[in-house]
Image: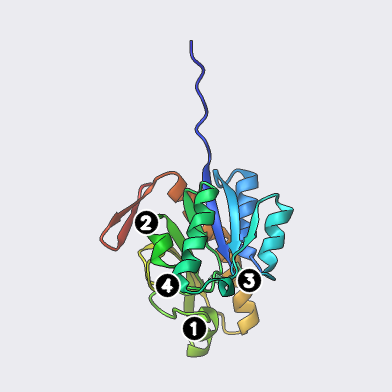
Amino acid sequence: MSEEVPAAKKRIGVLISGSGTNLQAILDASAKGDLDAQVAVVISDNEDAYGLERARKAGVPAVWVDRSAYESAHAYNDAIRDVLLEHDVDLVAMAGYMRLLGTEVLLVFRDRVLNIHPALLPAFPGALGIRDAFEYGVKVTGVTVHLADEKFDSGPIIAQEAVEVAEDDTLETLEAKMHQVEHRLYPKALQWMVEGRVSLRGRRTRIKL
Ligand code: GRF
């Protein structure tokens, strides 16, 4: 009788530029078994990103890809793609990665690249989603996890969760609430991807219950 070989865990490549608290949430969910996947590599465009340190502490390869070492965005994105391929990545999670991801990566990982944005897209895209929503005076904002495409904050939405802006919220207290939701929602959406529960119809996604 042949023994059943357990299926290999899906491998996630995480792209960061900064502190990497979302990366940490993904690492923690993976360690706890809430996310049935392993972080195979963390890539940063910023040598000083604290997220690289978080990766090292978790025993995950941490790679800095220096944009200034490449003549063009094309060559730089080729390099990012090659690192992801070297580490045999199945899924890519952008977690505070502050650059547009090139077609060089998106073509290889078509519909397998996720991004998290701290606003209810399509409202308040861009680098300052929390602040822009707060200053606009919205009563409800929230977090979006979506598939990445060639534009900033624009691909099909996988998950959204609303966050109320309370009367006494300051930008700082709102940021803290938003990050808490991010750290819960991103691993959950990644788990849906790992389980193959997300399907696409045009730009609408459907999540199988
Ligand atoms: C998060 O708010 C995320 O939504 C946005 O960038 C921030 C990254 O924070 N895309 P961190 O590096 O994960 O702490």
Question: Distance of mark 1 from mark 2, alpha carbons?
Answer: 30 Å
Question: Distance of mark 1 from mark 3, alpha carbons?
Answer: 27 Å
Return the residue found at the far front. Answer: 71
Circle number at residue 133: 1
What residue is shown at x 55% (from left), y 47% (from top)?
A: 35
Q: Earlier in the sequence, mark 2 or mark 4?
A: 2
Asked if one can make out residue 10 in the rendered structure from this viewpoint, the answer is yes
Kindly report which numbered mark, 1 or 2, lies closer to the viewer in this rendering.
Answer: 2
75 or 39, which lies in front?
75
What residue is shown at x 38% (from left), y 65% (from top)?
A: 103
Return the residue found at the far right. Answer: 57
Tell me if label 1 and label 3 are in contact, CB under 8 Å: no
Please rate how many residues cluster around mark 4, counting C-alpha atoms within 10 Å: few if below 14, some from 14 to 19, many from 20. Answer: many
Q: Which residue is mark 3?
A: 46
Circle number at residue 110: 2
201 on left or right of 198: left
Kindly report which numbered mark, 3 or 4, lies closer to the viewer in this rendering.
Answer: 3
Identify the secondary structure beneath mark 2: loop
Question: Distance of mark 1 from mark 4, alpha carbons?
Answer: 15 Å
User: Is 105 situated above or below 196?
Assistant: below
Tell me if label 1 and label 4 are in contact, CB under 8 Å: no
Residue 34 in picture, x, y percent from top left: 57, 46
Circle number at residue 153: 4
Please rate how many residues cluster around mark 3, counting C-alpha atoms within 10 Å: few if below 14, some from 14 to 19, many from 20. Answer: some
Please rate how many residues cluster around mark 2, counting C-alpha atoms within 10 Å: few if below 14, some from 14 to 19, many from 20. Answer: few
